[in-house]
Image: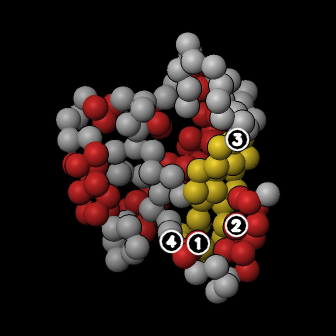
């Protein structure tokens, strides 16, 4: 995300299973936030260190999902990749909808049957190989 005063220096951005909000209360967190690669308690620990002040957690630079549609005008083309069985899925897809509502060039891809950390096992699943291929080219 760029400021209104700075010129664009990025020509493309890719977000892979993005953590975009300190709320941790989405349906995907309720479904997949325990016993997985990124348990809810671990994510809470991260937010407690990244942005311990509740006001900071409302800042769009700390938690990009707080960004308004108006603030998203003018970003570079964006690829947001989410995994179906991932606690971060709903955040990434909500952010993609904000980009789309702002008229930005955004592509959101949800990989079915994939879970958080799926990119760590590049040869195990066809969906992981497609994810890596799409993101690299």
Cβ atoms under marks 2 and 1 closer than 8 Å: yes
Q: Is residue 123 above or below residue 95?
A: below
Residue at numbered disc 3? 12
Say which quarter of the image contains residue 69: top right
Cβ atoms under marks 4 and 2 closer than 8 Å: no
Residue at numbered disc 1? 119
| Mark 4 vs mark 3, CA separation in Å | 23 Å
- Residue 14 visible (yes or no): yes
Label 4 crowd (10 A; few <14 / some 14-19 / many >=20) = some
Left or right for 35, reference 45 = right
What secondary structure is found at the residue carrying circle 2? helix
Cβ atoms under marks 3 and 2 closer than 8 Å: no
The disc, 4 or 2, on the residue closer to the chain's N-terminal end is 4
Cβ atoms under marks 4 and 3 closer than 8 Å: no
The disc, 1 or 3, on the residue closer to the chain's N-terminal end is 3
Q: Is residue 73 above or below residue 21?
A: above
Q: In the image, which is nearer the foreground, mark 3 or mark 2?
A: 3
| Mark 4 vs mark 1, CA separation in Å | 5 Å
| Mark 4 vs mark 2, CA separation in Å | 12 Å
Residue at numbered disc 2? 131
Residue at numbered disc 4? 117
The disc, 2 or 1, on the residue closer to the chain's N-terminal end is 1
Cβ atoms under marks 4 and 1 closer than 8 Å: yes
Residue at 73% across / 46% down in the picture? 107
Residue 117 placement (x, y as % from top left): 50, 71
Cβ atoms under marks 1 and 3 closer than 8 Å: no
| Mark 3 vs mark 2, CA separation in Å | 16 Å
């Amino acid at each position: 995300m760029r400021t209104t005063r700075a010129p664009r220096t990025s020509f493309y951005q890719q977000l892979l299973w993005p953590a975009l909000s300190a709320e941790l209360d989405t349906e995907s967190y309720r479904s997949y936030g325990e016993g997985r690669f990124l348990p809810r308690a671990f994510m809470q620990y991260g937010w407690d260190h990244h942005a311990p002040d509740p006001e900071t957690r409302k800042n769009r630079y700390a938690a990009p999902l707080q960004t308004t549609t108006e603030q998203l005008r003018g970003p570079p083309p964006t690829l947001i990749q989410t995994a179906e069985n991932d606690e971060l899925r709903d955040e990434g897809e909500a952010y993609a909808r904000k980009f789309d509502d702002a008229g930005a060039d955004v592509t959101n891809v949800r990989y079915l049957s994939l879970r958080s950390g799926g990119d760590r096992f590049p040869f195990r699943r066809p969906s992981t190989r497609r994810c890596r291929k799409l993101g690299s080219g």
